[in-house]
Every structure is written in structure tokens, then in C-alpha cells.
Amino acid sequence: MALRLTQRLLQAQTPFLARGYPMLVTKEKTEDVAHTKSALQKKLTGRDIPSAQYGGRHAVTMLPGGGIGPELMNYVREIFNYCGAPIDFEVIDIDPSTEGNDDLEYAITSIKRNGVALKGNIETKSQSLSETSRNVAIRNELDLYVNVVHCKSYPGIPARHKDVDVVLIRQNTDGEYAMLEHESVPGIVESMKVVTVENAERVARYAFEYARQNNRKRVTTIHKANIMKLSDGLFLEVANRVHKDYPELEHNNMIIDNTCMQAVSNPHQFDVMNMTNLYGTIVSNVICGLIGGAGLISGRNYGDHYAVFEPGTRNTGTAIAGKNVANPVAMINASIDMLNHLGHKEHANVIYEATYQTIVNDAIRTPDLGGNHSSTDVVENILKILSTKRVNWPHGNFFNQF
């Protein structure tokens, strides 16, 4: 009987990696996966407060990763505990030196169970051809097809440019990171770049929909179609076709090498950028470097069922690990994005305001931002500001009903 029950459950279960556009979520699927939707999906489905566990708390997978990841995660947990954020972290350490994938598989199972994760950069030290990048494997297995990095300047932070406000929409699961490499004959290695209509359309539609819903004016598609006429040509062709559904928005395109030069000389010309995997890595690091470095900006990875939040440039920071000089702001901002995604907007707002006041108004900054303060100085100042705040859960409105 137990076997028959298991078979029926498996038949009724919706596949984890079923693909579809965020705007095509049916009513039935809305009820099933409301607690794991992206902010864009929640706007479209009208569900601002996702489902939670008893007491309004959420379980979240925490993957500290390597380098500075563990210490940054400790700061996040300290801040959450201090302000009473209703999050229970399930911490999973993935050993970068192991040959097997047991830790990785357990981490993926945890994210599928919780729906949301906060992660640092996970190293893959093994040189074995059978070992894939853990970061890429997580994104592929969970079908996290889009990465969103909002590069916005902080006033007073030493930077190459001021008042930058660019949103990078990066494809996560296609492109050069398909991990399809082989040595065809001794001394000749071939690496495949994969571009599909389905994934190109998903990321393009996400970019245009994001621009529409956030009052942006222009989407720029980044490519190298002058050389890679089939692969990047297809990516550009799909973006042009999707643009027809958004006539109120401007759409232009730019070659990747020119994009880097233009970003360095005049980043203000960009609004929303739509690009493939490798180009997104390059451009995000360039623009983050222009506005203060890797320690400020967070990144969001969305699929139809899961969301993973992390620092925007995905740097490990091994060289500064354990020295109490790592900038914790990018990881804190990633945790703020996670809180907003889960509907805990009041906690997200007070943590954001305390972080902003710390690095902008109080000028408590780590060396990467031209300061001389330690990581713990930044966190202690955030806690000091939070001590003056009062945070109410959404349940606090109960008495206002009478």
C-alpha cells in the first residue's frame, strides 16, 4: 500500500524544473509555489505576502561557501537575530576539496525543500573533468534562468562615476557556461556555447517586463553577433522579437567589447541591460568596480520555483578571509533582497536604512571603500542603529482591525 501511495504522489507532483515565463503562472501554480516566487512574479500574481511556516517564519537554506563567505554569513545571522527577522537558517557547508557531489546534492535538496537560499561563492578546487562548478550546477539544477544585479551608486562612496543606476539582467543557464567541453584530438579542445530560443526569450522577456514594471525607459541587448552570427545572432533576434510586445520601451543593442568601453566612459547611458551568461559576468564586474567595488552590490537569481540570493560579483575573497577587513555590505544587501522576496518588508527596510546610514552618513567603511574600519566595525554600527528601531511583524496590525 505504501508503494502505491508513493507512486500516486509522484504522478501528481509538478516537476521541479518545469519551465515557463513568470507572467504565465496559472492560478493553480500560484497556490503551490507562492512562497518561492520572484518579486516580479509576485507583482504579476498579486501575492505580496507569501506562505510561511507556523508563526510566520521562513526556513532558508544558507550556503556560506568559501573565502569570506562564512564570516559574512555570521554577520547576517547576527543582524537577523538582533532585529528579530523571522528566518530560520539551515546552514550547509560544501567542502570545496571533495571529489564527490554529496554535499552539493544535499544543498540542492535543501533549496528545493525551502524554496529560497542565501549563498556565498562556492569553490570547486577539484581539477577532475567529472567535477562541475558547484555554483553553475546549482543554477542549472534549479533552473535559475535569470540573474538580476542592480548597480546603483551610494552617495559619498569613492567611485569612478557618480549617480549610476543600471540594472543588469543576465542569462544564467545557457551560453558559455553550458560546461560542454571535450578534447576532440590531442592538443585541440572544443568548448560549446549554447543559445536556445526558449532561454533567450525567457531572459529577454524578463528584462522588458522588469523595465515596464519599474518605470525604466530602455533595454540594451549585449552581444557579439558580428562574429558569432548564429549563437549571438539568435540571442539578438529573439530580443528584437520580444521587444515588439513592449512598444513603449526603447530597445537598442551593443557589441560586448564596445559595451565595456562605454560602461567605463559613460555608464549613465545604460538603463536595463539584457545579456548572455559570460557577458553578464564581465559587465557586472566592470560596473560594480566603477561604483565602489565588489563589496556593495547584491545579486538575485530567479527561476519559476526557486530563488537564490548572493553578492553581485560572486567573488570568493580568499585573500582577505579571516582578516576582519571584508566588506559585509554586499552580503547584507543580498539578505535584504531575500527578506523582500519573502514579504518581510519591514525588517528589510530597517536593515537597509541602518546599512545605508552606516556607510553613507556615518562613513564607517572598510578599506575597499577607502575607509580604515573593520568588518565588525560596520556590523556593530548597524546593530547600534537597529537598537533605536522598532520592527513590527505584519501580524502587528491585528489590533488595528477593531
Image (cartoon, rainbow, N blue to C red):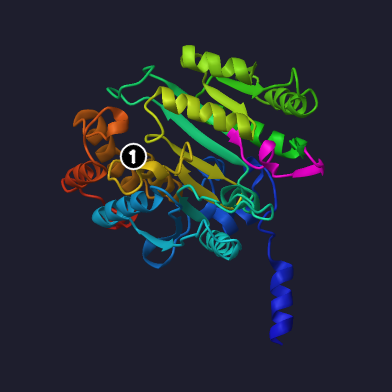
Disc 1, SS: helix
Q: Amino acid at mark 1?
A: Val
Q: Is residue 6 above or below residue 165?
A: below
Q: Quadrant of the C terminus?
A: bottom left
Image point (30%, 51%), residue name: 75
Residue that badge 1 annotates: 329
In percent of width and height, residue 60 lies at: 45, 58
In percent of width and height, residue 298 lies at: 43, 38
Q: Is residue 107 above or below residue 289?
A: below
Q: Residue furthest top?
A: 265
In percent of width and height, residue 353 lies at: 27, 37
Q: Residue furthest bottom?
A: 1
Left or right: where 107 falls relative to 311:
right
Image point (41%, 42%), residue name: 317
The residue segment tinted magenta is 170-187
Left or right: where 367 falls relative to 227:
left
Q: Nearer the viewer, residue 354 or 322?
A: 322
Whether 365 is among the magenta residues is no
Q: Quadrant of the N terminus?
A: bottom right
Whether 183 is among the magenta residues is yes
In percent of width and height, residue 194 lies at: 75, 37
Q: Is residue 296 above or below residue 386?
A: above
Image point (37%, 36%), residue name: 295
Q: Nearer the viewer, residue 51 or 94?
A: 94
For residue 250, say whether it is visible: no
Count the marks: 1
For residue 98, say whether it is visible: yes
Left or right: where 248 falls relative to 308:
right
Q: Is residue 132 above or below residue 167?
A: below
Which quadrant of the view contains residue 371? top left
Image point (48%, 40%), residue name: 314
